[in-house]
Image (cartoon, rainbow, N blue to C red):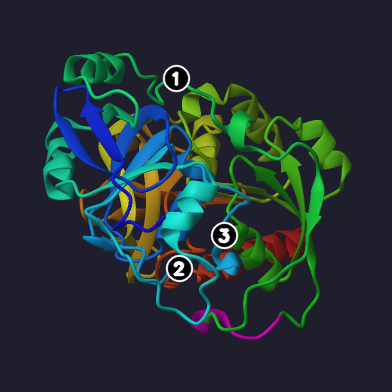
């Protein structure tokens, strides 16, 4: 059924009492969680399939979504992880030679409850001014009082270990590199390769492609894998991936990281950055509305360069209580929150943003090369 023929309605309610009505442009049902906004103009498919969005509904600030459809190769995981999808207008036309289906059909097929025809500026302003708000999106309940009560009772990401929900079930090998069309990193790796064990806290496929492209042979392990099992694989290094939820709740991963940093070089991204920081004595906190978009400026303190980055996180490392052994290396220039750190003596560093992009610019892809250089340098000193 086309959207023109689809007369189904949906209702979105926030815990602050706001209720809006729009068109149901996905699956029928009722979902809830934390509502966040994403400022990217493109990349909706990668956003929807990013495991870091588990437990959250996404409001797209760009007004027209879906105009280039869905391409199979752009999936960042095997399914949609966002709890709900909110748009100003879902395009009725998908125009792209890579397109395999429309976004509307994909949302229906993957069971994603979605709404359009609402004022996304109003929703974004509410989140920006009041912080991340719990929501309920329903095609079944149209009673405002009932909907607001459900939103107030929705489960937020606070204190939730969602990494254990999105992680892989068993260890596997990843060998696929980048698509060669990625302009910033064309060509395949021709030098020696390093053994890397990657923890899957919700790893995006483009992170794994990036590691392979920059000369790592990647073994992916579930989030709860003890450090002893990883070290028994005799890796040259360990990578800690992105993921959803409250980093303080993933205590088992923090404990593993605490042991791993004493034995091998470690690189962390997003949730991996937060887990690594906790393992080294720092603290994390929830942000008012987080960073979700593909246009965040970050300053690299070691090079002085400004890079435009892709970001997706609702928690951040508290830079006001950093241990002396941790050195800030990157700052988000929108709000001067900590965007990266390294250890003074151990071969360890991490960033709060996504150098693998997908979606977003490739300004920071060089960090995977920096990881390799750190590992090789450590081997040379051993």
Earlier along the polypeptide chain: callout 1 or callout 3?
3
Give the residue at x 14% y 22%: 17
Q: Nearer the viewer, mark 1 or mark 3?
A: 3
Residue 367: within the magenta?
Answer: no
Q: Is residue 142 left or right of residue 300?
A: left
In magenta, the rendered stretch is 183-188
Rounded to the nearest whole Å, what is the CA distance between mark 2 and mark 3? Answer: 21 Å
Q: Which residue does the numbered mark 2 point to in the structure image? A: 364
Rounded to the nearest whole Å, what is the CA distance between mark 1 and mark 2? Answer: 30 Å
* Disc 1 + disc 2, Cβ < 8 Å: no
Q: Nearer the viewer, mark 2 or mark 3?
A: 3
Label 2: few (<14), some (14–19) or many (≥20) C-alpha neighbours in 10 Å: many
Rounded to the nearest whole Å, what is the CA distance between mark 1 and mark 3? Answer: 28 Å
User: Which residue is most to the front?
Assistant: 5
Q: Which residue does the numbered mark 3 point to in the structure image? A: 75
Q: Is residue 348 left or right of residue 36?
A: right
Q: Is residue 310 left or right of residue 181?
A: left
* Disc 1 + disc 3, Cβ < 8 Å: no
Residue 187: within the magenta?
Answer: yes
Q: Nearer the viewer, mark 1 or mark 2?
A: 1
Q: Is residue 365 left or right of residue 192?
A: left
| SS of the residue under disc 1 | loop
Give the residue at x 32% y 54%: 5
Q: Position of residue 288 (x, y in %)?
A: 23, 34
- Above or below for 271 versus 16: below
Q: Between residues 227 and 85, which one lies in front from this camera angle? A: 85
Q: Which residue does the numbered mark 1 point to in the structure image? A: 159
Name the quadrant containing residue 33: top left
Earlier along the polypeptide chain: callout 1 or callout 2?
1
Q: Between residues 96 and 78, which one lies in front from this camera angle? A: 96
């Amino acid at each position: 059924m086309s959207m023109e023929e689809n007369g189904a309605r949906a209702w979105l309610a926030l815990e602050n009492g706001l209720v809006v009505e729009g068109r149901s442009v996905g699956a029928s049902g009722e979902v809830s969680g934390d509502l966040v906004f994403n400022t990217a103009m493109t990349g909706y498919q990668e956003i929807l399939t990013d495991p870091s969005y588990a437990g959250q509904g996404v409001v797209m600030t760009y007004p027209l979504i879906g105009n280039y459809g869905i391409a199979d190769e752009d999936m960042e995981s095997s399914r949609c992880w966002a709890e709900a999808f909110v748009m100003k207008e879902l395009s009725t036309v998908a125009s792209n030679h890579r397109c395999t289906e429309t976004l509307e059909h994909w949302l229906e097929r993957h069971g994603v409850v979605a709404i359009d025809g609402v004022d996304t500026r109003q929703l974004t302003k509410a989140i920006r001014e009041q912080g991340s708000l719990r929501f309920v999106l329903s095609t079944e309940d149209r009673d405002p009082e009932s909907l607001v009560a459900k939103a107030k009772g929705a489960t937020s990401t606070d204190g939730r270990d969602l990494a254990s929900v999105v992680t892989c079930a068993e260890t596997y090998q990843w060998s696929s590199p980048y698509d060669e069309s990625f302009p910033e990193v064309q060509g395949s790796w021709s030098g020696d390769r390093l053994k890397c064990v990657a923890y899957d806290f919700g790893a995006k496929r483009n992170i794994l492609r990036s590691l392979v492209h920059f000369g790592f042979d990647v073994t992916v392990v579930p989030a709860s894998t003890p450090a002893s099992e990883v070290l028994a694989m005799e890796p040259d290094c360990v990578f800690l991936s992105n993921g959803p939820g409250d980093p303080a709740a993933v205590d088992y991963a923090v404990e593993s990281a605490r042991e791993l940093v004493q034995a091998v070089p470690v690189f962390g991204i997003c949730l991996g950055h937060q887990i690594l920081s906790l393992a080294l004595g720092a603290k994390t906190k929830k942000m008012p509305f987080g960073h979700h978009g593909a246009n965040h400026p970050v300053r690299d303190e070691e090079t002085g360069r400004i890079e435009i980055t892709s970001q997706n996180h609702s928690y951040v490392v508290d830079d006001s209580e950093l241990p002396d052994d941790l050195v800030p290396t990157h700052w988000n220039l929108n709000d001067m929150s900590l965007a990266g750190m390294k250890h003074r003596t151990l071969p360890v560093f991490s960033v709060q943003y996504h150098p693998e992009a997908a979606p977003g610019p490739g300004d920071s892809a060089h960090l995977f090369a920096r990881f390799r250089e750190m590992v090789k340098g450590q081997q040379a000193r051993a």
